[in-house]
Amino acid sequence: MIELTAKKYSATVLEIQRMSTEDGPGLRTTVFLKGCSLKCKWCHNPESISGTPQTQWVGNRCIGCKTCLGICVNRCLSFNENGLDINRAKCRGCGTCAEACPSTALELMGEEWMLDDLLREVAKDKAYFDKSMGGVTISGGEPALQPKFVTEFLKGLKEMGIQTALDTCGLCSASSLEMILPYATMVLFDLKEIDPVKHQEFTGGDLDKILRNLLLIRDTIRSHVHPKTLWIRTPIIPGTTDRHDNIRNIGRYLADNLGNTMDRWELCSFNNLCKDKYQRLGLEWEYENSDLMTESEMDALLSTARSSGINPDLVMWSGSTRLEEETGNKNEQNIV
């Protein structure tokens, strides 16, 4: 039985994803919160960047009934030759149109959840966690932007005997991390780019603050019971973070500063399945026509990572790849 918490916290939840195998060990339920402190050019979850609910239109579900036009109180919907047009400047994400849409072509991305309700919801999966050595991962966006809720959420899970993981980009206040970390069994930390100028260009965020927070996590692991485990994850983005100098220098930084505190460094291959998300939100995506990485390209980056000074047994790559080209020699990148 779950005891109700004394404090009535709430958070804007984007999605609850069950049976995940990508956000920590075992079978996991990942809770994605809305709101991120970075604006990565390649973001695979653009609907998670804004902290407020957003309306998206799924065109292939629309039956053209135009029910939504009469429902919208802000008059921000209209139809043109391309289908439904949403005036994003006027839309307040109230969800009225999504509730009224008979074909579910309109969806509201983001819903307020009370803490106790969310704990009850994810606790339904405890049997899967126990059998697979899995648990719950809190992700985003950036979950540390809602530190009180996340702290109480992870605390409640630990009281139920559920393993917990914090998935963070590291751009948050140190005080938020200090509040959350004692209740996280493990941390998944994104380190995307090691050149501070390029990092600012690609993500809009301060690399120095992210690295300071990584060291804070390192020191917490070394001096406290929790967290116990640290995974570093680097997205491999074509023409952006896939440079061998970037991977080599990240590896050197990790070897020099984390030592045996880190348990895994994962190179995450770019995927382009999110292009429809941008279209549904009325956004452009500069990586729309970018190809997946090839297996040999990922293997070459893996070799660079393993030779950077880090324990090579800790490095791996994951994700989908495209078939090798039959002609040419595109896989032989310039290694600098």
Image (cartoon, rainbow, N blue to C red):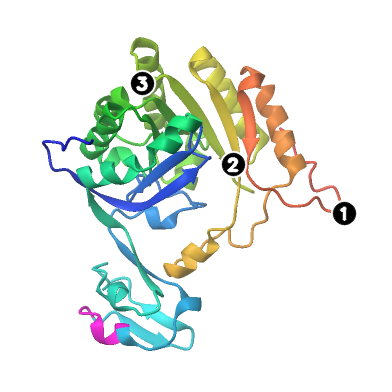
307 on left or right of 230: right
**Residue 138 picture quarter:** top left
Q: Which residue is mark 1?
A: 326
Q: Amino acid at mark 1?
A: Glu
Mark 3 surroundings within 10 Å by alpha-carbon count, few (fewer than 14), some (14 through 19), many (20 or more): some
Q: CA distance from mark 1 to mark 3?
A: 47 Å
Q: Is residue 165 above or below residue 314?
A: below
Secondary structure of residue under mark 3: helix
Q: CA distance from mark 2 to mark 1?
A: 25 Å
Q: Can residue 333 be seen from the camera position used here?
A: no
Question: Which comes sooner in the sequence, label 3 or label 2?
Answer: 3
Q: Which residue is mark 3?
A: 216
Does the magenta segment cover residue 70? yes
Q: Amino acid at mark 2?
A: Thr
Farthest right residue in view: 327
Give the position of the N terminus as an image quadrant.
top left
Task: Give the residue at x 42% y 28%.
Answer: 187
Q: Is residue 182 above or below residue 272?
A: above
**Residue 158 picture quarter:** top left
Secondary structure of residue under mark 2: loop
Task: Give the residue at x 13% y 43%.
Answer: 8
Q: How many marks?
A: 3
Magenta-highlighted residues: 68-74
Q: Amino acid at mark 3?
A: Leu
Question: Which comes sooner in the sequence, label 2 or label 1?
Answer: 2
Q: Which mark is residue 241?
A: 2
Farthest left residue in view: 6
Secondary structure of residue under mark 1: loop
